[in-house]
Amino acid sequence: EAGVVQSPRYKIIEKKQPVAFWCNPISGHNTLYWYLQNLGQGPELLIRYENEEAVDDSQLPKDRFSAERLKGVDSTLKIQPAELGDSAVYLCASSSPRGNHNEQFFGPGTRLTVL
Amino acid sequence: GNSVTQMEGPVTLSEEAFLTINCTYTATGYPSLFWYVQYPGEGLQLLLKATKADDKGSNKGFEATYRKETTSFHLEKGSVQVSDSAVYFCALSEVNRDDKIIFGKGTRLHILP
């Protein structure tokens, strides 16, 4: 079974530029998460989707960040415009209601560097 | 609010040494507790979990016991291998908060051959 797929793996942009990250969850997983992981820190939840509905976006900085999951499968996370402090790893995870309680499966992440 | 505190790394050990990575938590109610591992270049993987007091989670030779009286969930392994080199994250899920997971800062483990 394929795991959570994320692309790109690495992205380098200049500040004020837009950037987008893509995530394809494990087939059949209806819950999708985007996390932010700063260097030397644990992941912090940005947004959680149940199918196509964002059920928890309280930690998403909505002035510059946006996310969508239009068909309840793939998801994109966008930053516009990017700032220096956005340099981090952006992780996507998915889970299934049929799976073990709370078990989230993570992708390898996208490492963003803002110059 | 709920939080997880784990020992800072890096932790460097020789192969076959005994490993302990300390983790304590603060939570209201009765959270589930987890250890995740992140190998170089890979995503986080669930290593083990415990859902109630005195439960012991175990996997790949690693163990951790949910200690409610000390609010701890220390990770242990009797004999580490070079392949155990990774970053280990202690985490809890918030009960009645849509299962939101709170992660610690992670502990980097280096095992020397």
Image: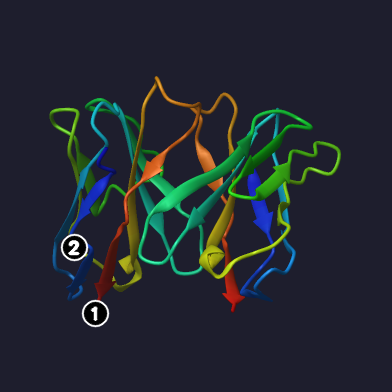
Specify the quadrant that holds the C terminus of chain B. Answer: bottom right
Q: Give the vertical position of B33 relative to A115 (above or below).
A: above
The kind of residue tagged 1 is Leu
In the rendered structure, the answer to whether residue A81 lies left or right of residue B24 reads left
Is residue B1 in view?
no
The chain letter for the residue carrying disc 1 is A
The kind of residue tagged 2 is Pro
How crowded is the residue under tag 1: few (<14 C-alpha within 10 Å), some, or many (20+)?
some
Q: Position of residue B109 (x, y in %)?
A: 59, 69
Q: Are marks 2 and 1 in contact (CB under 8 Å)?
A: no
The chain letter for the residue carrying disc 2 is A
**Picture quadrant where residue B93 is located:** top right
**Picture quadrant where residue B10 is located:** bottom right
Q: Position of residue B6 (x, y in %)?
A: 67, 58
Residue tagged 1: A115
Residue occupying the point 57% across, 24% down? B96
Residue tagged 2: A81
Of labels 2 and 1, earlier in sequence is 2
Callout 2: SS: loop
Q: Position of residue A8 (x, y in %)?
A: 18, 60
Is residue A80 in view?
yes
Q: Position of residue A94 (x, y in %)?
A: 34, 37
Disc 2/disc 1 C-alpha distance (Å): 12 Å
Tally of numbered tags: 2
Kindly give the residue lying farthest to the top in the view shown.
Answer: A98
In the rendered structure, the answer to whether residue B77 lies left or right of residue A66 reads right
Q: Give the vertical position of B11 relative to A107 (above or below).
A: below
How crowded is the residue under tag 2: few (<14 C-alpha within 10 Å), some, or many (20+)?
some
